[in-house]
Structure formats: structure tokens, C-alpha cells
Image (cartoon, rainbow, N blue to C red):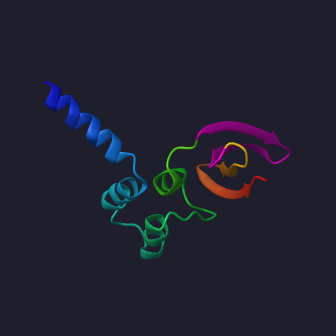
Amino acid sequence: MRLLMALVLLLVVVGCTPSVRRAAYLDAHPELPALEAQRIAEGLIWRGMTDEQLRASWGAPWRTREHANMAGTCLVLEYGPRRSPTWVFVRGGHVTGWSAGR
């Protein structure tokens, strides 16, 4: 039983590494255009990528919130250090832009 728990813990820890996460996503999506696959493998983001691609490339954000303005409501996903995060804006399931904190 201890060996099983140790193996599960190891898989959870290894599964959280960016390279493993990105490789798993790319293996599950062989239909991706080569340029998009390359960008995800390199941990890049771009306007128009899906929320799922963003999470494959950068992982889970440390905070997600909704933001409303004249253009409507979008999700704001926060990545990086909490003192100077990068905010990624997602509307309709696609990245529309981002802004680095100070």
C-alpha cells in the first residue's frame, strides 16, 4: 500500500512539471498546426489561443476572476509572482491579450 501511495505521489509531482504537462497536451492533440504545437512546447502564449492551450502552455493560474467593462465580461487569469503578476485576458474561450504587472 505504501508503494502504491508513493507511486501516486510521484506521478502527481511529475505531472505538474511544465514539460510533462505540455507534452501530454500535445500528445492528446496531434491535429494542432505545427506552429501552435511549437509555441505550446516552448511555453509561449498568443492572441487567439484557446483557454485550454493557455493552461497547457502556462499551467493553472494562481487566481481567476471576472472583469466587466463596456466591451462585456472577460476572465482575467493571473500568472507569475503575486507582487507583479501577468494578467491574461480570455473572452469567449480565447486569449485576447495580456498585461505584465510592475
In the image, residue 26 lies at what x, y percent?
Answer: 36, 61
Q: Is residue 99 left or right of residue 5?
A: right
Span highlighted in magenta in the image: 62-81
Please determine whether, in this image, residue 26 is positioned above or below residue 21. below
Q: Is residue 91 left or right of residue 6?
A: right
**Residue at the image position 81 percent from the left and 48 percent from the top:** 71
Whether 79 is among the magenta residues is: yes
In the image, residue 5 lies at what x, y percent?
Answer: 21, 29
In the image, residue 73 lies at what x, y percent?
Answer: 74, 41
Foreground residue among 83 and 77: 83
Q: Is residue 19 left or right of residue 91?
A: left
Residue farthest toward the top in the current orientation of the protein: 1
Please determine whether, in this image, residue 50 is positioned above or below residue 41. above
Q: Main secondary structure of the magenta part?
A: strand
Please determine whether, in this image, residue 71 is positioned above or below residue 30. above
Name the quarter where the N terminus is drawn.
top left
Whether 14 is among the magenta residues is: no
**Residue at the image position 52 percent from the left and 54 percent from the top:** 58
Q: Identify the image quadrant of residue 34.
A: bottom left
